[in-house]
Amino acid sequence: TSIPQNYSTTKPAIKAAKIICLSDPNDESNSSLYQAGTETISLPDGSKILSIGTSIDDFDLELLKAEQANVIFTSHGKAREPLAKLIQEIPSIEWIHSRSAGIDYITSDTLAESKSSIIVTNAKGSFSSTLAEYNMMAIAYFAKDLPRLLKQKNDKNWEKYCVQEIRGASLGIIGYGDIGRACAKLAKAYGMKVVAQRRNPSLSANDPLIDTVYGEGQDSINTIMGECDYILISAPLTDSTRGMINKEAFEHIHGNAVLINVGRGPIIDENAMIEALKEGKMKGAALDVVATEPLPVESELWSLDNVLLSPHNMDMTETFTAEATDFFLKENLPRFVRGETLLNPVDQAAGY
């Protein structure tokens, strides 16, 4: 989960949080929030939940305006349009919190234009450790040829074969944010070389986990695709990252490279990737996300032997969404009512 930063428990609240939950009323992961204000779970003095719903029709806009609602907690996958409407209709909104790390499901022109008056935060960090574990599993899957092991066991075949060493191999991370850094930390423990790409490389100038850092742009992506043994996509989905791993990028990838995607499916040109996989231009791909989810049954990805597929669940621990809700309730909400700096601010115009 996100690393807590101490806030003053003795400092009194200077304002109340009047919360709109743009979320499913039956979402058990939000139970700690929905029950807040009861005898067992408390809210800061004067704070309260005003309404819970998934569509704009679920909310009494006049009541919310009269109550001067100032916080929106969102965890619903179809929140984009109702959120934009709430922003337009309720001028007292000060803070929007997303239960997920990605905010691509809520981005809109309305949200982007609210940057001067509304703070947006996310659950960055809540999902990073388990995705880092998946990244190393995917690397080992190809390095040790796990499909062959399973086949030989099934065939009762005791045939030895050479495996690849992870130590000394290179991991290129395209989108070096919280998830990317968590992956770099484990990769370094394995003795890997880490190459990163991010919009502002100066932020990683003294990062001990990185051997090389590149800025944004096609040339940087092409270099990583051509030089690294494993390429991790952990960037958020924005207008600028959509289709970023394009046909040109796959023309630079080397034959023993493995592509791993834990970001969002549409970041990759899926047709170009499938072509590269079928033609042997790359060793394989490990995909926790794809362009269309659920993956259509007619997709060629199902039948490719050099593809490891998972149904966008490699961050799906039994408690991951509940922990993300608790981060809002127990970490950021106390800061908000005390007028302190909120954790995990995101740029709603940039999309991350």
Image: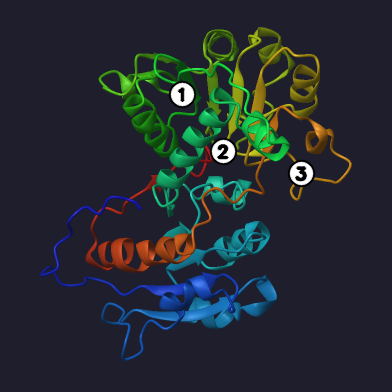
Residue 131 in the figure: left or right of residue 225: left
**Relative image position of residue 180 (x, y in whole percent):** 44, 32
| Lower sequence index among marks 3 and 1 | 1
Q: Quadrant of residue 144?
A: top right
Assess disc 3: are there few (<14), some (14-19) or many (≥20) residues with their C-alpha within 10 Å of its C-alpha. few
Q: Which mark is drawn over residue 262?
A: 2
- The residue pinned by badge 3 equals 292
| Lower sequence index among marks 2 and 3 | 2
Question: Is residue 68 among what the camera can see?
Answer: no
- The residue pinned by badge 1 equals 199
State the residue at coordinates (60%, 26%): 145
Q: Alpha carbon of mark 3 to alpha carbon of mark 1: how far?
A: 26 Å
Q: Which mark is drawn over residue 129?
A: none
Q: Does the CB distance between marks 3 and 1 fall below 8 Å?
A: no
Dot 1 amino acid type: Arg
Above or below for 209 versus 334: above
Residue sitting farthest toward the bottom: 39
